[in-house]
Image: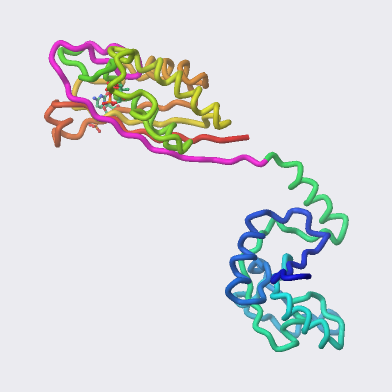
Amino acid sequence: MGERRWVAVHDGARPCVSGDVLERALAEVRGTGAAIAAVPVKDTIKVVGEERVISDTPDRATLWAAQTPQVFDYQILLDAHRAAGVEYTDDAAMVEAAGHRVTVFWGDYHNLKVTTPEDLDMVSLLLARPAVEYRVGNGADAHALAAGRALVLGGVTVPHPAGLAGHSDGDALSHAVIDALLGAAGCGDIGTHFPPEDPSLAGISSLLLLERTVGVLAEGGWCIANVDATMLAQRPRLSPHVPLMRRNIATALSVEQSQVSVKATTTDYLGFTGREEGIAVVAVALLYRP
Ligand SMILES: Nc1ccn([C@@H]2O[C@H](COP(=O)(O)O)[C@@H](O)[C@H]2O)c(=O)n1
Ligand SMILES: C[C@@]1(CO)OP(=O)(O)OP(=O)(O)OC[C@H]1O
């Protein structure tokens, strides 16, 4: 073993072990010297004697099912092997018998042991399953209402005497959605990708920025599961424009309209939106990576 300090014993019949379990193993054994993967049992366990008569029902709260990897300080494991007189069903039992404290760390219910043909069916299903990652993000934006500007939300020009101020078209709905998407992907925010100082963005349609955001997401392999946004505006009444806003955003994001939800609420005359000084939007987005 040279100068190596830790030994991780793994059962070849557990093919679904993950890197996360191994990382937890190393973190635990550094503190305790002897640690095993385990999961709390979900079934009530019966001790059954002769003629299938139950002799005991142990308190399930104290029962964990042992798994591998079981990780030990090399010297502790070697000494336990040298002292072992009988057969044990796992290395932990042998180390326990040698008088050492062995702790459990959180294993994985997917880390199944293939013993019977039924186990093989379960493991085959697990291994055939595509591993999908999910990320959620939120976004918020608020713009002042300025007399004489076009009011653009979700790419729709809504008839109103005042519109949203901004370097771009001021489309706070699109901006909040962009921030939710970038947040979910862990890719900064709208200002990082589309700086307000950039002269080429003056008056730009924010639907184009939404399209470019899809490119940023694609670089990380992210796909959009859904987006949900709420516009906070005392006036004008926005719900008649919501179907077109959804369609515009869905087209810009290259997703189905059903994946884009847009809603509106007043703030009952409260705050800057209630006083009609501005409009605010909050949004959430869910991304997945196949
Ligand atoms: N600018 C707005 C605000 C609200 N709506 C619609 O009215 C409904 C009720 O709004 P409350 O703020 O009074 O709860 C809301 O659910 C929206 O459908 C709207 O169209 N435009
Ligand atoms: C996209 C940008 C570009 O100037 O749009 P703005 O209209 O300035 O809107 P804001 O939400 O204040 O900030 C985002 C900007 O990066």
Reply yes or no: does residue 133 show up in magenta: yes
Residue 211 sits in quarter: top left
Residue at the location (32% across, 31% down)?
230
Quadrant of ligand 2 in image = top left
Residue 266 higher or lower than 215, as above or below:
below
Q: Position of residue 37 (x, y in %)?
A: 67, 67
What count of labels does the image hold?
0
Q: Position of residue 10 (x, y in %)?
A: 77, 64
Farthest-out residue, front: 2
Reply yes or no: does residue 279 show up in magenta: no
Q: Position of residue 64 (x, y in %)?
A: 66, 72
Can see residue 206? yes
Q: Say which quadrant the N terminus sits in.
A: bottom right
Q: Nearer the viewer, residue 19 or 108?
A: 19
Residue at the location (40% across, 35% down)?
188
Q: Nearer the viewer, residue 279 or 202?
A: 202
59 relative to 47 in the view: left or right: left
Q: Which residues are magenta?
A: 131-159
64 relative to 277 in the view: left or right: right
Can see residue 67? no
Residue 94 higher or lower than 266, as above or below:
below
Q: Position of residue 129 (x, y in %)?
A: 72, 42
Q: Nearer the viewer, residue 264 or 167?
A: 167
Q: Nearer the viewer, residue 15 or 54?
A: 15
Residue at the location (76% across, 41% down)?
128
132 relative to 183 in the view: left or right: right
Majority SS type along the magenta span: strand
Q: Say which quadrant the C terminus sits in.
A: top right
Residue 148 sits in quarter: top left
Residue at the location (42% across, 21% down)?
210
Residue 147 sits in quarter: top left
